[in-house]
Amino acid sequence: MPVIILWGAMILFFLGFLWLLSDFNFSIERYYLLPWCVLAAIVILSPSFYFLYKKKFDLFHPLVFGALTYVFPAFVFGGILLSFGWSEPFYLTFIEDPYYNLPLTLVYVMIGFISIIAGYSLPLGKIISTKMNSWLPTWEWDPSDVWVPGIFLVVAGVIFNIIGFIQGLVGFQRVDEVGIFDGLLFFLIILLTEGSLLLWLAIFSNKYKTGIYYIVLAGLIAVIPVKMALQGNRGSLVGSALIIVFAFQFSGRKLKLKNTVIIGAILVVSIFIGMIYGTAFRNIKGSESRANTDSYIVQVAATIDYLLVKDTGKILAEGMQNMAERIDNLSAMGVVVANHEHLKPYEAGFGLEDNIVNDLYTSFIPRFIWEDKPNTSDARAYSDLYFNFSENSFAITPFGDLLRNFGPIGVPLGMLIIGIYFRAIYDLLINTDKPLLWKKVSYFVLLTLFSFESFYATFFPTLVRTVIVLVISLYLANIIVKLVRGSTNNPRF
């Protein structure tokens, strides 16, 4: 019930604020989309309501997390915003016959999400997790054991993020030419997420607050705004908030009404602040062209100064409008649904033809072996072809990517595989008799690895590389745990 109340309150507040700021105009011709939005909401939220009914609701359950953090806001809420004219992106003109293609887009989304549920419900994921369970180590870490390895992972992650920032891989910038080790560097950046999550789990799990507790807490809090400022990313702040919420929940604490309200408020505020800062920073910087470190930091300072001196009312109004446009990804996928057939012959010229199959085998070859390897699923080329604007990365979504590559049949088959994947990682790492600390860290990384906004093609190569980074980094963390225990003459291991 608290979850339902929070969602209802957030939606009503958001719609009410937009209503006050805009010239509200009832346009009956747009209402055709609302019944499809209601139907999509029923399909997408059905697992969440089922778990609420069974009193087993978990925000980080695979069938709940994706639905509430992306699919429902982007397509159902986005469809409502589109219906009332609060989101009017320029590419709506690219959708021929929106009265047919936008409802059809929601149908593909519903089919895709039902396929995820079906894949999760099949026994195959459980069988895979059972087979893999015998391969996993039985590292038992107490919360007091992970301060040093957590700090090690955070420091390593910060270093790799700084290198990535200097190289143009991190932040609102892009490189014109991909280096031979850029791919490796990109995946080492996740060490910061691993270390942060491990330390937050320790913070919420430790009963005694020692000096290291306060030092780590202050350091983790300090990293959050710095990370958001440098990345210029609208989702950076809410991403950090999700790590804290996950750690709070999986530290064994019970989510009571008070905690649920606080968590819901933190997530909503994080989204709003991230949207305001990210949009302002991008407007001031102007483009994703690579900038030297000094120039980039000057633009960060200019963004903060701009937000401090600008009228609060205008900032809120712009933030709401930008949030409305950012949430709506129904229209972006609608462009793909409306145009994928007649643009198919041109995809080869943009390097997008059969990108799922091509990327599946080329992505596994490191760039230092194949220096001239083509870029995998080039978001700029996709934006150029479908939106006639290559200076931005428009949402493709796995649903749209599967549709482009294999036609309508590709959507249910491809998302069925994702459902099996979700069941495998959930049963392997969380739904066990003894979910260990390192398993919780691995689960969060692997759960958030699948993006409902990007290409389907990049998921499996990314999964392999991420697993390799997880295995090596957690193995090193376990060595540090043993060394720490040995230095304290603690016989447990």
Image: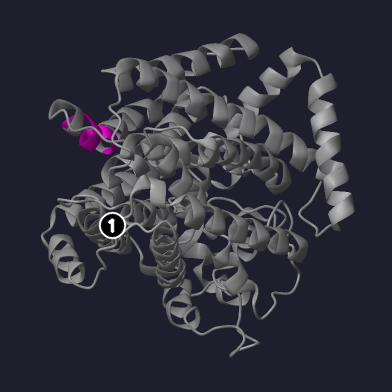
Q: Hey, which quadrant is residue 262 in on the image? A: top left
Q: Main secondary structure of the magenta part?
A: helix
Percent position of residue 376, x then y:
55, 73
SS for tag 1? Answer: loop
The tally of labels here is: 1
Amino acid residing under circle 1: Glu
Dot 1, how many residues are within 10 Å of its Cα: few (below 14), some (14-19), or many (20+)?
some
In the picture, measured across the screen, residue 117 lies left or right of residue 456, that is left
Which sits in the foreground, 375 or 431? Answer: 431
Observer able to see residue 102: no
In the picture, measured across the screen, residue 238 lies left or right of residue 413, that is right
Query: Is residue 395 positioned above or below 420 on the image?
Result: above
- What's the residue at 86%, 58% (across, down)? 292
Query: Is residue 282 positioned above or below 179 on the image?
Result: above
- What's the residue at 70%, 52% (across, down)? 171
| Magenta residue check for 48 | yes
Percent position of residue 270, x then y:
56, 30
Q: Quadrant of the C terminus?
A: bottom left
Observer able to see residue 107: yes
Residue reaching furthest bottom?
369
Residue reaching furthest top?
20
In the picture, measured across the screen, residue 256 lies left or right of residue 331, that is left
Stretch in magenta: 44-50
Identify residue for label 1.
Answer: 140
Percent position of residue 26, x then y:
51, 14
Q: Quadrant of the N terminus?
A: top left
